[in-house]
Amino acid sequence: MSTAPAVLRPQLWHQSSGGPAPRAVPMPARAPEGPRASNGGPVSAPPGDARARFAAAVTPHLDDAFALARWLTGNRSDAEDVVQEACLRAYRAIAGFSGGNARAWVLTIVRHTAYTWLRRNRSASLVMVDDLEAVERTHADAGDREHSTPETELIAKADAARLEAAIAELPAPFKETLVLRDVQGLDYREIAEVTEVPIGTVMSRLARARRRLVARLTKD
């Protein structure tokens, strides 16, 4: 598990060209319908318990949820739609949440929801993960392990607007890994849980994302 400091400024996702900082998406005034059993009836957990569990497990992580959705969609309004849908999914699934890492659980739901939205609305923008995995297997090397280098220092010092534009150009699997690690500060194990890939793949994607960022930043 990595304990190295994140490369990007944590407040980066709050910055954009000419617009106000994104905000956490408000929940609907009326709680969404509770989860249903296979026969169509309600599950045994009382609605009040579901609301309380949702408030404890999901609400504290709405800022992170919005940040991830915004980076994946590239748009505040679309990110709000994604997070609203993710909140509904989380509420319906809260009875099955057994505790543990609530942040990773919430971000996993947000990620799935975002990709569903992207496939429906912007399928051409998604890079096939299988293609990226083939590249990673071909080019994997010992340099994928995280450590401070002149390249990571360059990324950390880059202008926020240029950095945001460069991140936006990354393929989706590289982008989400970079954001989860360097913006939101998740460790490798948590990122592997959210993205559902081995830790080695997380490390490889992170290294390649940073290299692409450096190439883009030094080209300007």
Image (cartoon, rainbow, N blue to C red):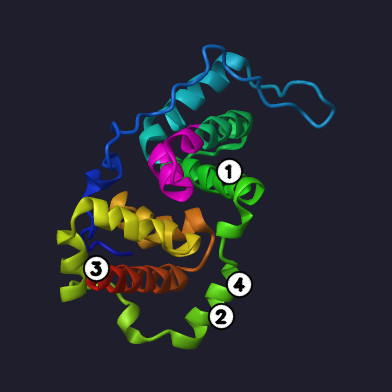
Image: 133 above or below 83: below
Residue at mark 1? 113
Q: Is residue 184 magenta?
A: no
Residue at mark 2? 134
The image quarter containing residue 200 is: bottom left
Image: 172 above or below 134: above
In the drawing, does residue 100 fall left or right of residue 2? right
Between marks 3 and 2 in the image, the one whose residue lies nearer the viewer: 3
Residue at mark 3? 220
Q: Position of residue 108 (x, y in %)?
A: 51, 47
Q: Residue at x 35, y 71 (%)?
A: 212
Q: Are marks 4 and 2 in contact (CB under 8 Å)?
A: yes
Q: Residues within 10 Å of mark 4 (few under 14, many from 20)?
A: few
Q: Which comes before the other along the chain, label 3 or label 1?
A: 1
Residue at mark 4? 130
Magenta segment boundaries in residue numbering? 65-80
Q: Residues within 10 Å of mark 3 (few under 14, many from 20)?
A: few
Q: Amino acid at mark 3?
A: Asp
